[in-house]
Amino acid sequence: MSETPLSPGGLVTLSCILEVVASKPGNVHRGADFDDVTLVDFTTSAVMLGNVIDGGPQNSVGETVLQAVRSNLDIVGTNTNLGIILLLVPLAKLVAIESNALLSSELILKFLSELSDEDGAKFYEAIRLANPGGLGTAQELDVADVTAESVDLLAAMELARDRDMVARQYSDGFQMLFEFAVPMIERGRELLGGLTEGIVYAHVALMAKFPDSLIARKCGPEVARHSQMLAAKAMEALTIDSLKDVSTRKNDYWQRVSELDFWLRSDGHQRNPGTTADLIAASLFIGIHNQIIKPPFR
């Protein structure tokens, strides 16, 4: 495998920008802001994160996560990218060490298993600083425990995996992204005509397969399941139907994506499928590094 021409931080920034500009339903994108956070905020966060990663190559994963959250709060003033930070910092640190190696679940799990309890404590501090919506409490290894000076990060992520899709990636070595999300980006790109369309397709496919855990935390499991049902209807529109030609199926799909988008935005941005968007950014990083997703990125 040839080495990517981008630095680890540069690849993080590119992945974040490709994700946020795509018109994914329910999210900020180049055609839609929220009242309190905008495309400029997300692109600023993307540049900041790449800079923190490349600017501290000697820093541990935990320290880099904490610095990224602090820098983002200083520059943007709000939590725009905690999930992305938690997903992309370990990937970027791994790529910095194994620049010529293909990313894989096995390689990621080995790398994560070597993180220290001090890394875990810094993760917890970063999460408390970012103060994500709907965080709640846990009976064991609660992130709100400010007295913890050492945290078994993988044990904490395993405890949270059923209620948080980011935590699940730590438990599974990002398996969901390798086996489902990255292939869906490429499938959508081929089916619908471009990378942006492929990103939207993968985002809707993920929502249809896995209820977004941010929606579940903020609005409850019933709302999350309803969003999953609407996403599944959009995906069903593209299934082969002998009575409809390809053009009609694509039109039906985009109409249902639009309906999903309208429903997700009809309660402020409480129904924002933000965790799914974070997973898409990490999928882009993996896909580009492994040369599955290739330029030009149009």
Image: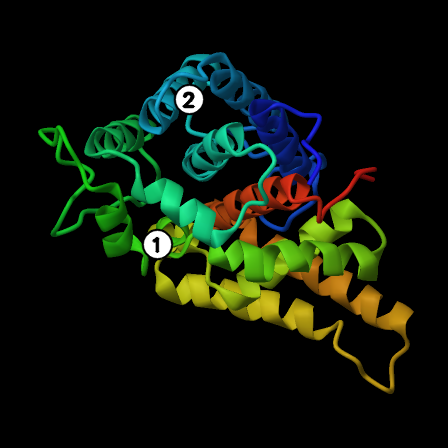
Q: Looking at the picture, how far across and down is residue 231, in whole percent?
A: 60, 65
The outermost residue toward the bottom is: 242
Any part of residue 180 in sight: yes
Q: Answer yes or no: do the residues labelled 1 and 2 have beta carbons within 8 Å? A: no
Alpha carbon separation for disc pair 1 and 2: 22 Å
- The residue singled out by tag 2 in the image is 68
Of 160 and 176, the residue lying toward us: 176
Question: In the image, what residue type sits under mark 1?
Answer: Ser
- The scheme the figure's colours follow is rainbow
- The residue singled out by tag 1 in the image is 171
Q: Looking at the picture, how far across and down is residue 112, in whole percent?
A: 35, 42
Any part of residue 272 in sight: no
Of 211 and 272, the residue lying toward us: 211
Question: In the image, what residue type sits under mark 2?
Answer: Ala
SS under mark 1: helix
Q: Residues within 10 Å of mark 1 (few under 14, many from 20)?
A: many
Quadrant that contains the C terminus: top right
Quadrant that contains the N terminus: top right
Q: Residues within 10 Å of mark 2 (few under 14, many from 20)?
A: many
Of 40 and 83, the residue lying toward us: 83
Q: In the rendered image of this protein, does residue 103 appear above or below residue 263?
A: above
Q: Quadrant of residue 114?
A: top left
Image point (82%, 66%), residue name: 250
Instruction: Choose mark 1 or mark 2, whichever is in front.
Output: 1
Q: In the rendered image of this protein, does residue 296 appear above or below residue 173?
A: above
SS under mark 2: helix
Image point (48%, 57%), residue name: 175
49 sits left or right of 183 in the view: left
Q: Earlier in the sequence, mark 1 or mark 2?
A: 2
Q: Looking at the picture, how far across and down is residue 103, in whole percent?
A: 55, 45
Image point (50%, 59%), residue name: 176
